[in-house]
Amino acid sequence: MASSYGLRNNTAASLLLRNSHIHLPRFRLNTHLFIPNPHPPLSISFSRLSPSAALSSSYAEEESSDGDHRENDELPGVAEAMNISPATAAAVGVCIAVAVLALPLAMPSLGRGLPLKTRAVSYATLLFGFYMAWNIGANDVANAMGTSVGSGALSLRRAVIIAAVLEFSGALLMGTHVTTTMQKGILVATVFQGKETLLFAGLISSLAAAGTWLQVASYYGWPVSTTHCIVGSMVGFGLVYGGAGAVFWSSLARVTLSWVVSPLVGAFASFLVYKCIRRFVYSARNPGQAAAAAAPLAVFLGVTGISFAAFPLSQTVSVAIAQALACGACGAVMFDRIIRTQLGHLLDKPPKDDAQVTESRTENESSKNIGLLSDIAGPKGTQLKIVYGVFGYMQVLSACFMSFAHGGNDVSNAIGPLAAALSILQGGASGGEIVIPNDVLAWGGFGIVAGLMVWGYRVIATIGKKITELTPTRGFAAEFAAASVVLGASKLGLPISATHTLVGAVMGVGFARGLNSVRAETVREIVTSWAVTIPAGATFAVLYTWIFTKFLSYLL
């Protein structure tokens, strides 16, 4: 019985791994922003931030570059991390578990009207898809929220709530509804023609294998690429059960190249952005006013670029450019009004009360003698409050954009193989284009949110805390640079991983303060986990495929 997935051309698994590992950030203005924690965090604060308290407190000097890493490596439990009681954490876990077991029974994609045996296997397939989405939420959401939490711009609980809403909205509203052929992906579809049971086993094995490795990585707080996980799983399955001709080796080479290109480009870009902030904001006679003037410009550039690259604008290039510029101008004006409204009482104050700032802006430090790579002392007192306030708002805004885009982009890593497996199982494997229903999109979005709520804090701690000490200016430099690199690379078709780019960008900000500001032990662990990702996914996929083929031979 044909399902509603609308297949054409006998390549049901064709959607498998065509999914790009590029995460396109999309700007969406968040009207409820938070003043960052005034104290540059030596460790991530998991407590609720108070905006009024933040502005009333005195800032510690930002620019200490002694590489002090006094944080405790032991991660707290979810209750402590989220600042909730253990009973509340347990209740949330029970609610999620009940929903996971109950919701598939009401989903149309379960296959109503099909034999009970088929529906039972469909139910198990949906659970495998949820498992993969859960691990995407536990690991990959740190791309959007890690630096904001690490810098103190958002508390962990607020970050999780914001990300949960935006990730689910992005998955449901912007998730890939149609996945086309595998010919531009990893596997050659024609190799598996007439082997539907094997292909089905390979699909669910890939979901289980990628989810397994992501869970291991999340437990240890390693930020790995979810796309690389699913690629490794499919490569392992294809090689063992389809032979060397079942894999597009050129596509695999591009993925491997991204291991090197992504962190290097991200580090270089964030290094330049942070040095520009120090050169043109910190060295100004009034750093607060300079930050307030620079912020709308950065928003204009970001919104314009993202609108042109990602929004459905006019097909005419000149009109599309004009529309993107209009979006950028609107974003800049709105952000400027937010800054003036929230920080106007500080911006109107002259910097004469900050003796240290006045002394540091003498004729000996005239702009003529300051280069981009010069070591510039940071502002203090009220000026530092303003600078951190402005960049804290910008960082929260960019985190919201990236979170929404991530939900729409990466949910396909879970629901793509899931939809193909359901199509094969329910008798609709007759084409090369699979239409993914809304209930499957929502299921993937729910999985991402559940993983974020339960385990997301682990990788967020690594991104925001363990690589280098972050503040609002450093966090913004890393996030803005990573978003710009990913956006440009996706437009040019370059092999860039958003996860690797952001990790490299955080390292770049640390390098801008000195080599001893980056924790080498954490970097080694992360790089090792990147190198192991594809082999680990492949190994698990081969093992799971062997188990599932034995099991399905008796069941189907």
Image: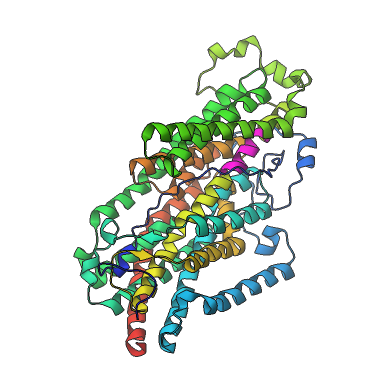
Place of residue 512 in the rendered image (x, y in percent of width and height, measured from the top left): 52, 32
Query: Magenta residues, as a range?
Result: 389-398
Q: How many marks?
A: 0
Front residue of 523/248: it is: 248
Which residue is painted at 53% across and 66% down in the image? 447
> Magenta span has 384?
no
> Magenta span has 397?
yes
Residue farthest along the top direction in this orientation: 363
Is residue 410 at least partly visible in the picture?
yes
User: Quarter of the image containing the C terminus?
Assistant: bottom left
Secondary structure of the magenta portion, mostly?
Answer: helix
Place of residue 438 in the rendered image (x, y in percent of width and height, measured from the top left): 48, 65
For residue 223, above or below residue 50? below
User: Quarter of the image containing the N terminus?
Assistant: bottom left
For residue 89, above or below residue 474? below
For residue 434, above or below residue 324? below
Residue farthest along the left direction in this orientation: 245
Which residue is painted at 37% across and 34% down in the image? 317
Q: Which quadrant would residue 470 be assigned to in this image?
A: top right
Place of residue 537 in the rendered image (x, y in percent of width and height, measured from the top left): 38, 65
Q: Left or right of 195: which side holds 413?
A: right
Is residue 469 at least partly visible in the picture?
no
Front residue of 458/456: it is: 456
Q: Which quadrant would residue 19 be assigned to in this image?
A: bottom left
Q: Left or right of 471: which side holds 321?
A: left
Place of residue 394 in the rendered image (x, y in percent of width and height, measured from the top left): 61, 37
Q: Which quadrant would residue 116 be assigned to in this image?
A: bottom left
Colouring used for the render: rainbow
Which residue is painted at 32% across and 60% down in the image? 180
Which residue is painted at 60% across and 40% down in the image? 395
Front residue of 503/286: it is: 286
